[in-house]
Image (spheres, rainbow, N blue to C red):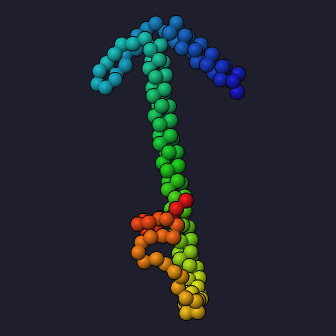
Amino acid sequence: MVLVGLLLIAAAAGFTIDVFAQNTASVDVDVLGRTFAVDPGWLVVAGAVAVAVLLVGVRLVVAGVARARGRRATLRTAQRATRERDQLAQQLAVERAERDGGQQLTTEHDARSSPAPDVPTDGTGSDGTEGRPGRVAR
């Protein structure tokens, strides 16, 4: 592959040198409404520049399309993940409702059969968390 590339480069360089060396007569070129008298070798250089610009443009288009495709794929993946998350959240809510429904009956039965625990009503905890309800001493 490298050898073929080197051969093509050598052929292009030889062709360009031959065009510059062998063709000394000027050629009239019409560009954007103007006429220029140039050597044929400069036409080869102008063609090479035009091809280079074309390749850069094609590369930018291909990169833009690939980037857009990647963004769309990422968006589809995120949408699938969102749908899956919502489904799992709904399943979890259903399971919790079923479980809480069963536990609520058990809790009501336990509440009727056992007395309430002693809870101080003055805001002091038994562990020294005085005046700080909801705090746990460590």
* Viewer-closest of 22 and 57: 57
Q: Which residue lies at the image location 50% right of the left edge and 9% below the top edge?
A: 20
Residue 91 position, x and y percent, is: 56, 76
Q: In the picture shown, does residue 132 fall above or below 68? A: below
* Viewer-closest of 37 and 88: 88
Q: In the picture shown, does residue 114 fall above or below 40? A: below
- Quarter of the figure with the C terminus: bottom right
Q: Which residue lies at the image location 42% right of the left edge and 77% below the top edge?
A: 121
Q: In the picture shown, does residue 55 fall above or below 96? A: above
Residue 120 position, x and y percent, is: 46, 77
Q: Which residue lies at the image location 55% right of the left edge and 10% below the top edge?
A: 17
* Viewer-closest of 123 and 35: 123
Q: Quadrant of residue 84?
A: bottom right
- Quarter of the figure with the N terminus: top right
Residue 8 position, x and y percent, is: 63, 21
Is residue 100 visible to us here? Answer: yes
| Image-based side of 106 in relation to 29, left or right | right
| Image-based side of 24 in relation to 81, left or right | left
Residue 52 position, x and y percent, is: 48, 26
| Image-based side of 30 in relation to 44, left or right | left
Q: In the picture shown, does residue 12 fall above or below 62? A: above
Q: Which residue lies at the image location 44% right of the left edge and 14% below the top edge?
A: 42
Q: Quadrant of residue 123?
A: bottom left
Give the residue at the far left of this rendering.
33
Is residue 97 visible to us here? Answer: no
* Viewer-closest of 40 and 113: 113
Count the marks: how many?
A: 0
